[in-house]
Amino acid sequence: MKFCPLLSSSATLLTLHNLFLVTAYTALNDDFLHAIPSAASDFDPTNGSLLAPLLTPRVPGTENHTAAQHHFVNFFSTQLPKWTLEWYNSTSTSDANTPIENLVFKREPPWTVPGQANWLTLAAHYDSKEGSVGASDGAVPCAVLMHVARSIDKYMTQMHDEMDALGEGGTVEMDMAVQIIFLDGKESAGGSKPALYGSRALSETWENATNPVGSKYPNSLSQISMFVLLGFLGSVNPIIPSYFLTTHWVYRNMEALEGRLRKLGLLETQPPFAYFHQTNEIMATTEEPDDHVPFEERGVPFLNILPSPLPKNRDTNEDDGGHLDLPTVKDWAKIMTGLALEWFDMMEVWPE
């Protein structure tokens, strides 16, 4: 097992600063867990409304890549109109100047001003390698995040409305927001290792995006309270290690969340081991560089929802809809929704 490298002292201080500011995480009660929406048929590989449109090769610069972008935009604009879109364009430096386009969908409290909100950041890349559908490597993680956004939206609205009516806001616990990033340019057209073009460009852009004088956070990057990256999801019996010491507490909360969902019979799978079950303090590195790396290097706390070992069919033409385990996919949608609801302390809006 490999061990994660030490961050620079400045990056470590930023990470610890952000983590100490996050205190609102509250477990959902059993009734709320029962109320977490099921994915139903949304993840059907043939005609599921969330997943099926993404099950094509999505190489940057191609029509399928553009179609994936339209899928995201249409979903949020028609089903989640209170979310805003920020579109970040850049160009890869070694893949024939291929355009790289990151899409960021945001939902923040109505009373916040620039530099005030702290962002739970949920991310996945949506591009794929040439010749591969990238079902587990991109498509499923993106579809899961769409499901999470739709599932938490009404609770976000209720919480914002109640707090706004009471004139609340202005503290870290009250100024929590969510952003979902669909990252581009992870894959390299000419190499075997991930290029991470989109995540490198976006993390640098946000690091240089200075907030107004007097803001709680100096730049956009420092507003990220937690960066949660999803990758290679959809294979049967995944095992998710804990990759970062300072966010191990979040990992343990996800372990508890999964355990309670299973105990209540709310998950479809019955794996030999829980997805989250590494409870010691030994942190492994990922098997290959992933999109969290540019953010980690800048001191952003991250949680990697990435199985180890990685699926054997990754980066091949067998990473398609026919090789997904749909009960596992649906369970991921429910677990990730539960994480977001607990992060935002949504028990505050649950009727007693």
Image (cartoon, helix red, strand yellow):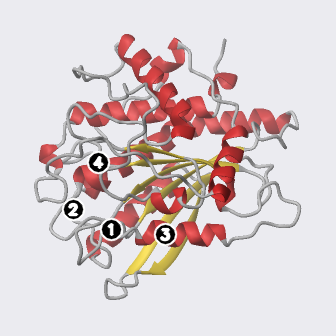
7 with respect to 38 (left or right): right
Residue topped by disc 3: 200
Who's the residue at 51% across and 26% down the image? 253
Marks 3 and 2: in contact by CB < 8 Å?
no
Marks 2 and 4: in contact by CB < 8 Å?
no
Amino acid type shown at disc 4: Phe
Residue topped by disc 2: 56
For the N terminus, the image quarter is top left
Residue topped by disc 4: 232
Camera-near label (4 vs 2) is 4
Marks 3 and 1: in contact by CB < 8 Å?
no
Q: Point out the tag, 1 or 3, that comes first from the N-terminus.
A: 1
User: SS of the residue at dot 2?
Assistant: loop
Who's the residue at 56% across and 66% down the image? 203
Mark 4–mark 3 Cα distance, whole angstroms, equals 20 Å
Q: As displayed, is residue 81 above or below residue 132? A: above
Camera-near label (1 vs 4) is 4
Q: Pointer 2: residues within 10 angstroms few (<14), some, or many (20+)?
A: many
137 with respect to 160 (left or right): left
Q: Point out the tag, 1 or 4, that comes first from the N-terminus.
A: 1
Place of residue 127 in the rendered image (x, y in percent of width and height, measured from the top left): 32, 65
Mark 1–mark 3 Cα distance, whole angstroms, equals 23 Å
Amino acid type shown at disc 1: Ala
Q: Point out the tag, 4 or 3, that comes first from the N-terminus.
A: 3
